[in-house]
Amino acid sequence: MNCLILSPPVHQPSEPPAGAYLLAGALAARGIAAPMLDLSLEFFHYAMEQSGMNTKPALKYMTAPPEGVYDTHRHAGHSGVIASALRSFAASFPGWSLTPMDCSPPRGLHRILDTPVSGTPFSAFLDRVLDPVLEKHGTSLVLVSTAYLSQLPATVELAAFLRRRSLRFLVGGSVFNSLSSTGGGLELVRRVIPEVVAHDGSDLMPDGKPVLDSITHPVLLSGRPYLSPAPVIPAAFTTGCIWNRCLFCPDRARPFRYLPEDTLRDFIASAPRESMIHFVDSTIPAHRLPGVLEALRRNRARFFGFARATGEYLAPGFLDALAASGCSMLQWGLESGSREILRRFHKGTDPDTAKKVLREAGGRGIRNYVYLLFGLPGETGDDREETLRMIREIGRDVDFLNASVFNLPLECELVRRRGEFGMELGEYDAGSDVIRLYSPFVCDGRDPRREAKGFLRGEFGKDPAVSRILRNTPKWFRAAHMAFMGPDSPR
């Protein structure tokens, strides 16, 4: 059997899509020809060319900044040029919106499922790019990997394209797994794309072993450059979440397991030298990091990924070893400065410990990207103020900030126990998208999401400590590009 792995538009063109890359690498490690074509990367280059705007200086900066690092202000200017070119291209398709991070069709996703829209941004693109690839790399099975809802419009059109060419194909990926386990609307997708499957890819492995037990680097068919200064390579220590206790975590539905350490070490060692390794785990298991540091140093690689700010990072010499082994950035899910919020939702972290971890990491040159979450059930004004005070205390060691408003998964432990939290579930308007990952709610008659949005627009966003960090946080091209930000980005 020979396969072709396709990742449809739109996801950020700064690194390979993790799901497609790792699936292609797992099949290749088992002797199955499975090259990967990142159609999203191809599409962004195509859209920029079609826009008629001169994006060459911006693309040159994104792929080859001076000394291989980005300057915050120059990055903002060049990414703005790229965003403008994408808007210009999308203007030829009434009602469509296109950014470096998202794509939406006229009147929402449900219109794509009710009546597929004609004259989309992808029609001419697929004919031009995909037909030559199919002709050159004949295949017995096409596997389409869709990770985000932003890829769904193109996935619908790609499925129709493959059907017209009488090709055998399957459509899978994390977005369909999420719709199946914690969301709703998968049956609506299957009316338009009957080829959708909702599993982790194990069924495709001829040896019957878990997908990532054997993996190598796949063949990438695109000749287009990713918009990053060095190759960004997705890798993982685990499947599922090592903590797996948060009441609203959708990963609680996924079985947890560690990948074999030798497999991961060999994968890192065989990556292109001086790569940026992106650990895509829900959270990096800190106790497993020492086992790969030597492979990272030998490769002269750098790395980043999500982490839990726990006492493990304060062990003597631990952060020193990470910094010496190329740790460029850690994405910390602090979520709240309120102990009561963290306790109530079983987050397993402590604000005082988190503050110490960030100070120590920042002092060693590791970039700190902090994630905060507001609008949780029962959140009070005092809880929000505690989070703001925490950021004021550690603000000089926070490089980037993502302050978001809580979305309640349709299916999670918190929904099942909603009575304990005074929650009542709501309904979306009839005209909203039929594909749903989240549910509206009120808590004791209040809407904590609305209160949180007001706080973020007002006191929080206007606070000097917060506004400095937000100015430093890129609007476009997030995590991977932040890991390449240079020391000229002010602390």
Image: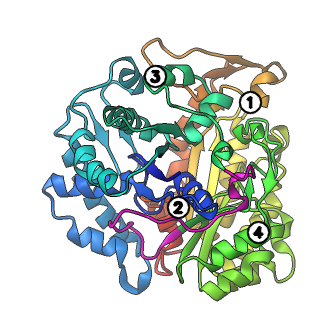
* Within-10-Å neighbours for mark 1: few <14, some 14–19, many 20+: many
Callout in the foreground (3, 4): 3
Query: Can residue 455 be spotted in the picture?
Result: no
The magenta region covers 206-232
Label 4 vs label 1: CA separation? 30 Å
Question: Does 476 appear above or below 399?
Answer: above
Question: Does 373 appear above or below 418?
Answer: below
What percent of the width, then of the height, locates residue 360? 74, 76
Is residue 217 on the magenta stretch? yes
Residue type, numbered disc 2: Ala
Q: Are marks 3 and 4 in contact (CB under 8 Å)?
A: no
Residue placed at 64% from the left, 60% from the top?
Answer: 30
Q: Which residue bears the numbered disc 2? A: 479
Q: Which residue bears the numbered disc 1? A: 412
Residue type, numbered disc 3: Asp
Q: Which residue bears the numbered disc 3? A: 433
What percent of the width, then of the height, locates residue 256? 80, 48
- Which part of the image, by quadrant, shows the C terminus? bottom right
Query: Can residue 131 be spotted in the picture?
Result: yes
Residue placed at 31% from the left, 44% from the top?
Answer: 98
What percent of the width, then of the height, locates residue 45? 27, 58
Q: Earlier in the sequence, mark 2 or mark 1?
A: 1
Q: Earlier in the sequence, mark 3 or mark 2?
A: 3
Secondary element type, mark 1? loop
Residue placed at 67% from the left, 66% from the top?
Answer: 394
Residue type, numbered disc 1: Cys
Indicate the quadrant where residue 127 lies.
top left
Q: Residue furthest top?
A: 430
Instruction: Give the total of numbered labels.
Output: 4
Label 2 vs label 1: CA separation? 27 Å
Q: Earlier in the sequence, mark 3 or mark 4?
A: 4
Q: Which residue bears the numbered disc 4? A: 357
